[in-house]
Amino acid sequence: MIMIIISVMADKEAISKNFKKYLSSRGLRRTLQRDVIVREIIKSAKHLTADEIFERLRKKNPNIGYATVCRNLKLLYSAGIIDEIKIGNQKTRYELKSEDSHHDHLICVKCGKFIEVFSEKIEELQKEMARKERFIVLRHKLEIYGICKYCGEKGGERS
Amino acid sequence: MIMIIISVMADKEAISKNFKKYLSSRGLRRTLQRDVIVREIIKSAKHLTADEIFERLRKKNPNIGYATVCRNLKLLYSAGIIDEIKIGNQKTRYELKSEDSHHDHLICVKCGKFIEVFSEKIEELQKEMARKERFIVLRHKLEIYGICKYCGEKGGERS
DNA sequence: AACGCTAATGATAATCATTATCATTAAAAT
DNA sequence: ATTTTAATGATAATGATTATCATTAGCGTT
Ligand SMILES: [Mn+2]
Ligand SMILES: [Mn+2]
Ligand SMILES: [Zn+2]
Ligand SMILES: [Zn+2]
């Protein structure tokens, strides 16, 4: 129990630390806005849009600007701290990306829910496939669209 | 040789035929514009944007409208005849999708080239993963981003 | 602690792919 | 031929994202 809590806390602190490192290594500045944005990302639910994050931040920081949120989400993405999820023409969503947590998504076309999945074998086969083409893999995106068990069941679509 | 040509021709005719079937089954009309759009899609290079297709069509059909091209690309997608490829905020690209030709893409972040790949094993593992979640798969999208062999070689990025 | 440099912010405008609107045209059924 | 209405083409609207720019505030130096 305690172990879990400690490891999560350590993880979160590691994220902030990495971000600060990233900033200073590039001559970027640490700002109040950047601090509250990472903190919100860390404690928030996953798969939020820029304006969902913006609205949450507004509650405590009424003066923060939407552009600032967007800019810094991009920055966090560049820093490898968060992932961007772009589905069709929907708003971009963001989620924290801690070292060991890569995963892909099953996306329900009825209710929009994201189910996180992972297959070491698929990851391996991707690398193998790329290797055959002498292609250097930087990242990938696997999205499986369909109907989740709740929406599939009895016509209902409540999760 | 001849066999190949015949099979390709048959395939192309099958596409037009399927489209006509799709139209009539839904009470939609066959139009000159729809005809030239499918024909262009069939003979064109792959991974074209709506306005690339529009420009090509304009050469022979100076009166065709951009909205008509977009609308019918969406229609062809609904009919299962073409695939949509949406990368980040780039313009949507389209490619013909014949029965047996599903594939995924390696996408070079330097030169933008698309390399088509396919792994039966990955396809199987995806289905297996979904089955575990009692998720009904409708379609999927696997994009692997990285650096192609030409761009990786000697700093060059000519294909 | 004050100064200077300039990155960062916040308000707003611009961008641009896509979608909607609507008067007109033309499939296709009668 | 007439009628019905889907489809078209020109254009406007939309909306997420990005750019602009005057102002603010990190942060290293003095
Ligand atoms: Mn996720
Ligand atoms: Mn392709
Ligand atoms: Zn669902
Ligand atoms: Zn390349």
Image: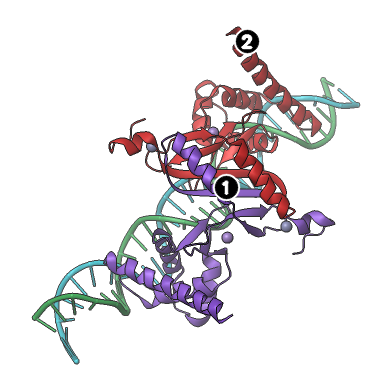
Chain colours: A purple, B red, C cyan, D green
Instruction: Identify which residue, A148 or D9, lies in the foreground.
Output: A148
Q: Secondary structure at mark 2?
A: helix
Determine the image quadrant of residue A20: bottom left
Q: Is residue B43 left or right of residue B7?
A: left
x 65%, y 53%: residue: A106
Instruction: Identify which residue, B76 or B137, lies in the foreground.
Output: B137
Where B102 sits versus A148, above or below?
above
* Residue B28 visible somewhere in the drawing: yes
Q: Which residue is mark 1?
A: A121
Quadrant of ligand 1: it is bottom right
x 65%, y 37%: residue: B77
Residue A148, position in %: x, y? 73, 55
Instruction: Identify which residue, A9 or B53, lies in the foreground.
Output: A9
Chain letter belonging to callout 1: A
Where A122 sits versus B117, above or below?
below
* Residue A147 visible somewhere in the drawing: no
Q: Secondary structure at mark 1?
A: helix
Q: Residue furthest top?
A: B2
Question: Mark number for residue B3?
Answer: 2
Residue A76, position in %: x, y? 42, 64
